[in-house]
Image (cartoon, rainbow, N blue to C red):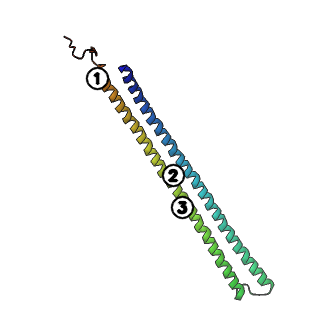
Amino acid sequence: MEAVSVGAKVFAGFAQLQQGKAQAQLYAMQAKQAEMQAKVQQLRFRSEAINHKRQGVEVLKRVAQNFATINARAAAGSIDPFSGSVANLAVYNLGKGVTDFYTTKENQEIAKTGGQIAIATGAIQSAQYNAAGRMARTQGMINALSTFTSAGMQAQDLGMFSPSPQPMSNPGYVEF
């Protein structure tokens, strides 16, 4: 019966090793998932940056169209399009367009920065999962070593390592 107990401890030690490895693999998969999620988030931010860039181009197109419209209407009415209230209207239009364009430019930079932050955050999270995996593997080895040591001590106490086992029924028995 004692041999079965020692065998069970050895089996438990191997199970602890496998459990540590499995836990480490789980953390490794979670680390990969964190990296992939960060990349997906970065792509979303990149798409957002491209949309802001597109909006900036549209703003510039509208400014150019407004200039053309102002100039054409002024010229059609025999008014100098580069002086007086017509010029003021063009300057006002340009000011609004520049403000809108730089707003889209800033939004584009914010989106790019958001993507960089997402990648950095994913890398940090991945590193944390990898560290937890190493700890799980190490803890499994420590637990297994402890269980193997306990099994060895129990086996030694039972006389399993001595060349001639001592009978257990008579503790005072001495062999000559």
Label 2 sits on residue: 122
Residue mark closest to the camera, 2 vs 3: 2
- Residue drawn at 50 percent across, 40 percent down: 26
Q: Can you give x and y, in whole percent of width and height, for residue 46 in the image?
A: 60, 58
Q: Residue furthest bottom?
A: 84
What amino acid does circle 3 point to? Thr
Q: Is residue 152 left or right of residue 96?
A: left
Disc 3 secondary structure class: helix
Query: Which residue is at the front of the view, 161 or 1?
Result: 1
Label 1: element kind: helix
Give the vertical position of 175 relative to 39 (above or below). above
Q: Point out residue 40 in the picture as x, y percentages from the top left corner.
A: 59, 52
Q: Position of residue 162 (x, y in %)?
A: 27, 18
Residue reaching furthest left?
176
Q: How would you rate the neighbour count of disc 3 (Cα within 10 Å): few for under 14, some for 14-19, many for 20 or more? A: some
Q: Is residue 3 above or below residue 116?
A: above
Q: CA distance from mark 2 to mark 1?
A: 52 Å
Counting residues from the N terminus, which is met first, the one under dot 2 or under dot 3? 3
Contact, CB < 8 Å: mark 2 with mark 1? no
The residue lying furthest to the right in this view is 76
Question: What residue is pinned by disc 3?
Answer: 113
Left or right: where 82 falls relative to 173: right
Residue with the mark numbered 1 = 157
Quadrant assignment for the N terminus:
top left
> Relative to residue 65, is residue 165 drawn left or right?
left
Residue 74 image-quadrant placement:
bottom right
Q: Are marks 2 and 3 in contact (CB under 8 Å)?
A: no
Image spot of residue 28 (x, y percent): 49, 42
Question: Few, some or many C-alpha atoms within 10 Å of disc 1 (few <14, some 14-19, many ≥20)?
Answer: few
Q: Is residue 20 left or right of residue 89?
A: left
The residue type indicated by label 2 comes to: Gly
